């Protein structure tokens, strides 16, 4: 794998984790949203990642084992959680049903915070990988001095 392939792989992972963080932020912001334009409470969203072969001239020309092992990360789709909404008794709420229960989003704040920590650590690991690749490239250029 060449320098640019490693940067592309890490860059794709950074973009995927950024999308994941945006979804987590959106989930946390809407943790108490009981009314949406689609009707009903907000539904938790999550990103589905997939490992794909990087596109590029290098990978089309070289079909060796190392080039085939390099995989980029892509967000292939964003899915809504299918768990039912959380019902809470609050007869005074404007969105309460006839029995006095309000349907709140299926967002678990503790789970979202754990996902946020995981996404942050993955993002930091990929930044470190980019920095390491950059440092190796700089050391390679210093050999010619």
Image (cartoon, rainbow, N blue to C red):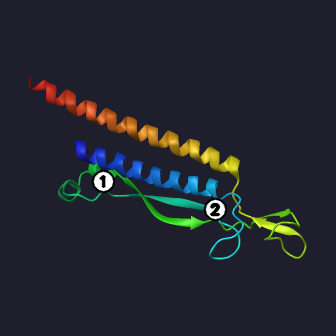
Q: Residue at x 40, y 52 (%)?
A: 15
- Residue 107 sits in quarter: bottom right
Q: Secondary structure at mark 2?
A: loop
Q: Residue at x 15, y 25 (%)?
A: 142
Left or right of 70 in this view: 32: right
Q: Where does the C terminus fall, quadrant-wise?
A: top left
| For residue 95, side relative to residue 111 (left or right) | right
Q: Residue furthest top?
A: 145
Mark 1, residues whose alpha carbon is within 10 Å: few (<14), some, or many (≥20)?
some
Q: Mark 2 — residue? A: 44
Q: Which mark is residue 68?
A: 1
Location of residue 109 in the rendering, given as x and y in whole percent from the top left corner: 69, 50
Among the 4 quarters of the image, the one containing residue 61? bottom left
Looking at marks 1 and 2 on the same chain, the residue that comes earlier in the sequence is marked by 2
Is residue 2 among the parts visible in the rendering? no
Q: Residue furthest right?
A: 99
For label 2, count other residues whose C-alpha is less than 10 Å away and answer few (under 14), some (14-19) or many (20+). Answer: many
Count of all numbered marks drawn on residues in the image:
2
Answer whether labels 1 and 2 touch (C-beta < 8 Å).
no
Residue 47: image x %, image y %? Answer: 52, 59
Would you say residue 50 is visible in this rendering? yes
Give the mark toward the camera: 1 or 2: 2
- Residue 134 horizontal/vertical position (percent): 27, 35
Q: Is residue 113 above or below residue 141?
A: below
* Secondary structure under the numbered disc 1 in the rendered image: helix
> Quick one: 44 or 83, which is closer to the camera?
44
């Amino acid at each position: 794998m060449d320098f640019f392939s490693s940067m592309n792989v890490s860059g794709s992972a950074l973009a995927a984790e950024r999308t994941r963080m945006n979804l987590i932020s959106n989930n946390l912001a809407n943790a108490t949203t009981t009314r949406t334009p689609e009707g009903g409470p907000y539904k938790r969203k999550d990103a589905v990642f997939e490992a794909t072969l990087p596109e590029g001239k290098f990978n089309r020309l070289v079909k060796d084992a190392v080039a085939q092992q390099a995989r980029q990360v892509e967000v292939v789709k964003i899915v809504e959680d299918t768990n039912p909404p959380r019902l809470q008794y609050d007869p005074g709420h404007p969105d309460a049903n006839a029995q006095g229960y309000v349907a709140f989003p299926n967002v678990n704040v503790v789970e979202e915070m754990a996902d946020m920590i995981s996404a942050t650590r993955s993002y930091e690991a990929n930044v470190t990988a980019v920095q390491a690749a950059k440092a190796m490239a700089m050391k390679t250029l210093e050999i010619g001095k």
